[in-house]
Amino acid sequence: MNIVLTPFARTRLFPRDPRPTSIQDCSAEAFEQHVATRAPECVLPGYAPFCVLHVHRNWTSTRCSVVEITDANRHRLRSGYEARSRAELPVLVRWFESEEPPVAKYLVPILYSREQMAKEGTPIDADWGIVGCLYTMTPEELPMAPITMLRNALGVDEGGSGVPLDRDAYRRSVAFWERHANWR
């Protein structure tokens, strides 16, 4: 199985101006090589047949991507409208400012099949393309954000995957994201 880092993931995980929330101590090329050549601790099914998650022990100093909302940090929550790319419409997002979570124990790259990548207009010369990565304390998937689930249901023309909305999964996602937020 060969794996490549997609342009979409490269700009989000390895931005030109490095951020504390991007992958640390590792170039995009080294990350791609690590994921492509090292066996994951386990492989998790994704939200659709074309998606899998490879669980790797964190070999970097990358911090967890999600922070639990508490009474002590609630005042640091911020929100705004943002798009993940120039082609997408902005959506309401929220995040913490001035929070520093622990170093993640796991990096969990999210992989899409070659067929799905072609369907979404980003053909790859590999079996799998890395489209994102979770930074977690446990070797499991974080629930997809509700807005991502809605974007996916809108289809590839709106930056999604075309997977219909699963109402139960959406409710579980809302329950998680009501108590957690990303940080910057």
Image (spheres, grey):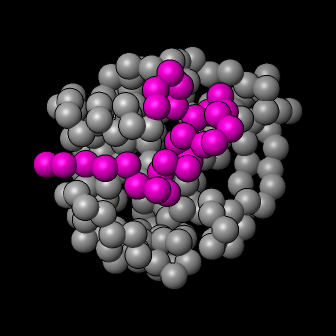
- Which residue appears at 18% of the width and 49% of the height? 2
Asked if one can make out residue 65 in the rendered structure from this viewpoint, the answer is: yes
Task: Give the camera-side residue of 66 and 180.
Answer: 66
Which is more toward the observer, 184 or 27? 27
Residue displayed at 72% across by 42% down:
95
Residue 142 screen position, x and y as percent? 45, 42
Query: From what the image shows, is residue 120 above or below residue 174?
Result: below
Q: Is 77 or 155 nearer to us in this picture? A: 155
Q: Residue furthest right?
A: 75
Query: With 21 as the anchor, is 117 left or right in this view?
Result: left
Residue 47 found in image quarter: bottom left
In the image, what residue occupies the spot 39% across and 69% down? Answer: 122
Q: Position of residue 173 (x, y in %)?
A: 51, 53
Instruction: Measuring from the top left, give residue 64's x and y in whole percent.
Output: 54, 28
Residue 25 belongs to the span the image colors magenta: yes
- Decide if residue 51 is in sight here: no
Percent x, y of residue 21: 62, 33
Start and end of the magenta stretch?
Answer: 1-27
Q: Quadrant of residue 115?
A: bottom left
Residue 145 sits above or below residue 120 on the image: above
